Image: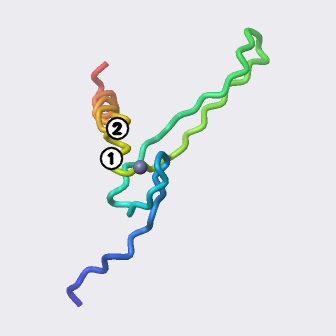
Amino acid sequence: MGKRRRGRERLENCDSCGRTVPRDKAVDFNKRSVFSTDLRTNDNITLFTDVDVYYCISCAKHRKIFEKKKKLAQMKRGVF
Ligand SMILES: [Zn+2]
């Protein structure tokens, strides 16, 4: 005993460039896609689907996901 079991992390594919990154290095981002029929009646259907996507660090930086995450954390804290 003593040695922690490492080196067998789950791998994720970067959503942007397709690179395989270990889970602890990948940046997960909750992408919310909205599907709406845009009808102004009661038949309007709006679907929110949350998709977890993983980016490698370079793609996350490129897409400014770190800044988005900062904003999300602020919103959770109650700063509106
Ligand atoms: Zn990437």
Q: Residues within 10 Å of mark 1 (few under 14, many from 20)?
A: some
Picture quarter containing residue 76? top left
Residue drawn at point x = 73 percent, y = 20 percent: 37
Picture quarter containing residue 25? bottom left
Residue drawn at point x = 33 percent, y = 34 percent: 64
Q: Residue furthest left?
A: 2
For the residues labelled 2 and 1, say whether their Cβ atoms are less than 8 Å apart. Answer: yes
Question: Label 1: which residue?
Answer: 58
Left/right of residue 30 with respect to residue 35 in the rendered view: left
Residue 18 screen position, x and y as percent: 49, 54
Q: What element carries label 1?
A: helix
| Dot 2 amino acid type | His
Asked if residue 13 is positioned above or below residue 10 in the image, the reply reads: above
Residue drawn at point x = 79 percent, y = 18 percent: 43
Q: Residues within 10 Å of mark 2 (few under 14, many from 20)?
A: few
Asked if residue 1 is positioned above or below residue 32 in the image, the reply reads: below
Color style of the picture:
rainbow
Question: In front: 73, or 18?
Answer: 18
Q: Does the residue labelled 1 lie within 8 Å of ligand 1?
A: yes
Question: Label 2: which residue?
Answer: 62
Question: In front: 62, or 9?
Answer: 62
Left/right of residue 7 with respect to residue 40 in the rendered view: left
> Which image quarter is the C terminus in?
top left
The number of numbered badges drawn on the structure is: 2
